[in-house]
Image: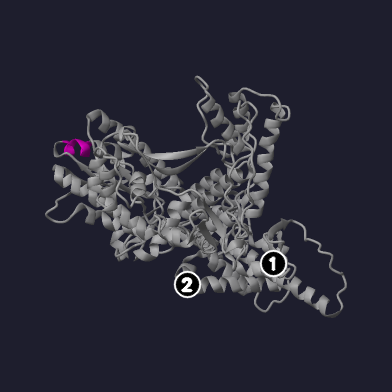
Amino acid sequence: MSTELAPTLARRAPCIAIPDYIAGVKVNKALFAGPTGPEDLTFIDRKLARLEQVTAGKLFGEYQRRRQQYQAKSANLWLRMAADTAQAQQDRFPVPIRRINEEARREAVAREWATQVNAIVSHLTQGFTVPQPAAELLAAAMAPARQWGFSPVLPDLSGEVTDKHLDHAASAVARLQDEDWWLRQIRRAYQRHRELVAIMAGDVRRGVSPYVSHRAFMDYRSNKVAQARWLADMLVVNEDKGLELSLAEAHAASVSNPEIRRVELMVRMRGFEDLAWEQGHAAEFYTWTTPSRFHAWNTVKEDRGRSVRNKRYRGTSPRDAQAYLCRQWAKARAAMARAGITVYGFRVVEPHHDGTPHWHMLFFVEPAQRDQLRDILGRYACEHDQDEIKNHRSARFDVLAIDPAYGSATGYIAKYIAKNIDGHRVGDDYEAEAQANETATNVAAWASLWGIRQFQQIGGPSVTVWRELRRLREAVKDPLIEPARVAADAGNWAEFIGSMGGVSLPRQDRPIKLAHLVTPCASKYGEDLRRLVGVTSAGGCSMRTRLDGWAVVKKSPARGCGERSELPLSGGSRAPWSSDNNCTGRIELPSLAVELAGAGLDAVDRGRMEAGAVVVVDGLYHWIRDGRLYQSRHRPQFGRSPAKNGRKGWAEDRDLEQLQQHRLNHQAMAVLAGDLPLDEYIEAAPDTTKAMQALDNQLDKEYREAPVSFRQDQYLIMLSGFVASFQGWGEL
């Protein structure tokens, strides 16, 4: 802008008073003191007007940081991209975003849309009495889900329709009528939307919160704590065999245990390597990285790894980046198949500091095919946006030939496996600038949030067969099963591959397969349940590896009084076109511990409810009677006298005060997590002073638990400043 035009524009600019707060974030008025300040404020207001307040606040906080660090023009360009992306993501939801930003609201919306599908199916089938063509009924039931972009797995009804297709379609319609299915889809979609906003706002990156936002990390940790509590409260028993085991111990002894998972991956990797050296194959280590447009933040190595905004970023999510890499891998695998190239090994997916995934692949291949394999993988890794790499192909595709004289292939990939599981003996995580054993939980939270498979075996036999054979401790007479059993029992993956027909034999031709027991129509959605019971060989011999009669029960002082598992054994009725629509049965009620965990209630809440109190969480009233958990949106009446005189009235007043405080604490936690807007929290509070005190207590607790993350979270800092401004004001 020329200096001659600046005074003219300043005179023409409207006199707009600079507000104290925008979207709950304090305005740095000095940043808007220039001649373009009023115009920029109008632009900001227009861009943030339709966004959720938490989203708008995060974007405005980052906007001010950029305006101060760079220039107003740069900040405006960023805000245009970020706000448009956030708005596009928000517009994907067919309901206002406010209706799904809390769990209680999501439950109501899920119930509403499941009821809508149920009404559609009921209307077309005249009250579930008249059969309808499967394709037409499924298309009508899918119409509401398509508004959200949701879909269960659908059958292909374009060709010949068999009973299997009809059963599959019936299960899909049953899911679409289930409010639990809707709640899972809505919750996941909102969490990913919220995390994408955090990525754009700079809450996910090195120096702030690597891999996932602090809020997503806290959600993941809370879920793990609830899961651990439930596991500790349950037993697995087999009354027929007189066996009993803590469910927590059973969980710790399975591959769900990170340490066992890591060790098993290393054993299999070592087995592949031993087989490769025996057959004279070459070991190659490849790294695939997505084009720049998928990366929200870059690092400047010359400036101590400082993270900076990537100008090429286009608002994509880590899931979008993973989908891109999967498409490129599918092309590469097709090209390898055409060229007759056989590879085996492992693929490891890990995040960059801003959550964008990249792949590490350790493959073994015949030396004569190595150069051709490199060409294929490099071609599809660098297929798009070639202008940004030019002669720097290694930025997108990196190759390392592993020489056994300088170290093993297993040792090379070990740190990538450990870093993404538990950080065992990795040391520094240079991507996150922290210890790997501390950031491993962030990686796990990232994979869980975005639904990304971290490890994939390429080639070789089924690892499930390997695990089942390790359950057999005694020798068997079958000549096909016994060699594989011995190899599995000894932890020799290379020998196991040999006994299963080699690395490249198709799964259907393997000499040993899994054996399942099928219970027809036993799932909640009327599907057949396949229960793994053992293995079977091509010679016709079957070996049972799992006992019948196991049940999950709740621990109790007198063991014989345990509650049965909450796992349902059968489902309800299905859509009426199916010829075998008689799959009904009893569904056992969930155990009290599971119901409490699902409602977000802990042991303290349980003790209070068992003593007769009513606990309020997210606007729902919870109480326990006769060993069952009840919920209602209205306060229950237990026949208490309304009198407030005497000891009893004092106790009721005390209980009511405790309930109100408990509710304030839960709501304050929701404000910190971004699930409850600050203005709604204040307006709904019966006592503003107590509400601010509850918020201050939660902020103090958050700071004590994670001081570094707290100081780097602009939203939490904003809340702290807001609370501090109320100190000494009293009731508003």
The magenta segment: 369-375
581 to the left or right of 715: right
Residue annotated with mark 2: 707
Q: Secondary structure at mark 2?
A: helix
Q: Secondary structure at mark 1?
A: helix
Mark found first going from the N terminus, 2 or 1:
1
Residue at left offset 67%, top offset 63%: 681
Quadrant of the image containing the C terminus: bottom right
Q: Main secondary structure of the magenta part?
A: helix
Q: Residue at (66%, 40%) from the top-left corner?
A: 114
Question: Where's residue 165, x and y in %?
Answer: 52, 27
Judging from the image, the colouring scheme is one colour
Amino acid found under the numbered disc labelled 1: Met
Residue 335 in magenta stretch: no
For the residue pair 564 and 709, the one nearer the viewer reads as 564
Q: CA distance from mark 2 to mark 1?
A: 34 Å
Q: Residues within 10 Å of mark 2 (few under 14, many from 20)?
A: few
Identify the amino acid type marked 2. Answer: Pro
Q: How many marks?
A: 2
Residue pushed farthest left? 405
In this rendering, the answer to whether 552 lies above or below 437 is above
528 sits to left or right of 651:
left
On the question of residue 36 being in view, the answer is no
Relative to residue 673, is residue 681 drawn left or right? right
Q: Residue at x 32, y 58 (%)?
A: 418
Tell me which corner region of the image, top left, top right, bottom left or bottom right, holds residue 477.
Answer: top left
Rendered image: mark on residue 609: 1
Dot 1 alpha-carbon crowd within 10 angstroms: few under 14, some 14 to 19, many 20 or more: some
